[in-house]
Amino acid sequence: MLKGGPVWALGTMSGTSLDGVDAAMVLTDGLRILEFGPSAYRPYSPAEREVIRRAFGRWHGEEGVRAAAEVVETAHAELLARFEGAEIVGFHGQTLAHDPVGRRTHQAGDGAVLAEVLGLPVVWDFRTADVELGGQGAPLAPFYHHALARHVGAAGPVGFLNLGGVGNVTWVDPRIGAPEVAGACLAFDTGPANAPINDLMLARRGTAQDEGGALAATGHADEAVLSRFLAHPYFYRMPPKSLDRNDFRSVLEGLDGLSDADAAATLTAAAARAVARGSEHFPTPVSRLLVTGGGRLNRAMMAMLANLMPCPVEPVEAAGLDGDMLEAQAFAYLAVRVARGLPTSAPGTTGVPAAVGGGRISRP
Ligand SMILES: Nc1ncnc2c1ncn2[C@@H]1O[C@H](COP(=O)(O)OP(=O)(O)OP(=O)(O)O)[C@@H](O)[C@H]1O
Ligand SMILES: CC(=O)N[C@H]1[C@@H]2OC[C@@H](O2)[C@@H](O)[C@@H]1O[C@H](C)C(=O)O
């Protein structure tokens, strides 16, 4: 258990869109955020990405998983070696598979290996305890969103939307002092966000993403595909709820007859409409929706969201935060919570029956 006051924690995120690893430092006591520290990013090479991609959907011991874990561990070790002054590491790993109904979730990468390499305590495997207790195991950033809302001095409920490979949103009431208290947070995955767009761009154009949403901006969304998409039972489930990267794959097929631009516009609109549909679950309206993750740089997606939502939709930078590093910061914050025996999820964030602290700690 960590003693005393605030510590510099170093957190990582290797997200579902598979672009690379983010790492960022936060000074925190596991309750409040005192200061933001340096951050860095290491992209995966195309070859590394392919090794990980081949292991998507697989579980420990299955083919290709050890190779993927080695890529993840090596990339993290390289990136984290660039930092100085961290006292603890929060290592998310790379989600390969996520099946909360089956009470299992798989983040590749061994925290014990990193602890040895870095000579620091490493908190990892953040999601397993939650799913084993019947929670969704995701999203886990919401407790950090709660701390952020208080840090930026929000006076009432605000929304944090992460537009990564998958989207997730947190409704936060910062007037409630602790995130695990009933009514402080309601969180859930909204639906697919950038992952299907990236897959489309790779298949049709050989590029990693729709830069700035430029292609989507020139197309027209296909309403038939969108209504089939929005009829998916996921949208009728009450939150909390979470998704695996490819859960919507079959619904989002059927774009073959569409031009590249119309297909991109359709997938972009699908992400935005999923968020708007999700926001209907908010307990009360929010004063603003603060957007983090790569999707905030997709102007077509942001414009669609602004049209659909009744409140201002702004990148988190509008509140002085860093939308590239927010999730890495989240796992720094959560690592300190784990080390201090504080919970990392609650009924309102993952649907777990009672607040629970996930994560394993490996020491060098
Ligand atoms: N300039 C940009 N224009 C358009 N899209 C962008 C831009 N920058 C990033 N993106 C999109 O955002 C994605 C990266 O987002 P982010 O890093 O938030 O996702 P992630 O952390 O991998 O995913 P998740 O949060 O689901 O785990 C890219 O793969 C791309 O689709
Ligand atoms: C199982 C898993 O890794 N889920 C990710 C994914 O990416 C976005 C969304 O789906 C969210 O549920 C989660 O990540 C964020 C960081 C979270 O746990 O808050």
Image (tube, grey):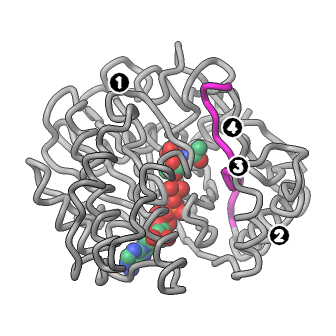
Q: Quadrant of the N terminus?
A: top right
Q: Secondary structure at mark 1?
A: loop
Q: CA distance from mark 4 to mark 3?
A: 10 Å
* Disc sitting over residue 54 in the figure: none
The label nearer to you, 2 versus 1, is 1
Magenta residue span = 85-102
Horizontal arrangement in the rendering, residue 153 relative to residue 78 (left or right): left
The three-letter amino acid code for the residue at tag 3 is Gly
- The question of residue 264 being in magenta is answered with no
Q: CA distance from mark 3 to mark 1?
A: 25 Å
Q: Which residue is mark 1?
A: 238
Q: Which residue is mark 2?
A: 74
- Location of residue 255 (image quadrant): bottom left
Residue sitting at the far top: 353
The three-letter amino acid code for the residue at tag 4 is Thr
Q: Is mark 1 within 8 Å of ligand 2?
A: no
Q: CA distance from mark 1 to mark 4?
A: 21 Å
Q: Which residue is mark 4?
A: 105
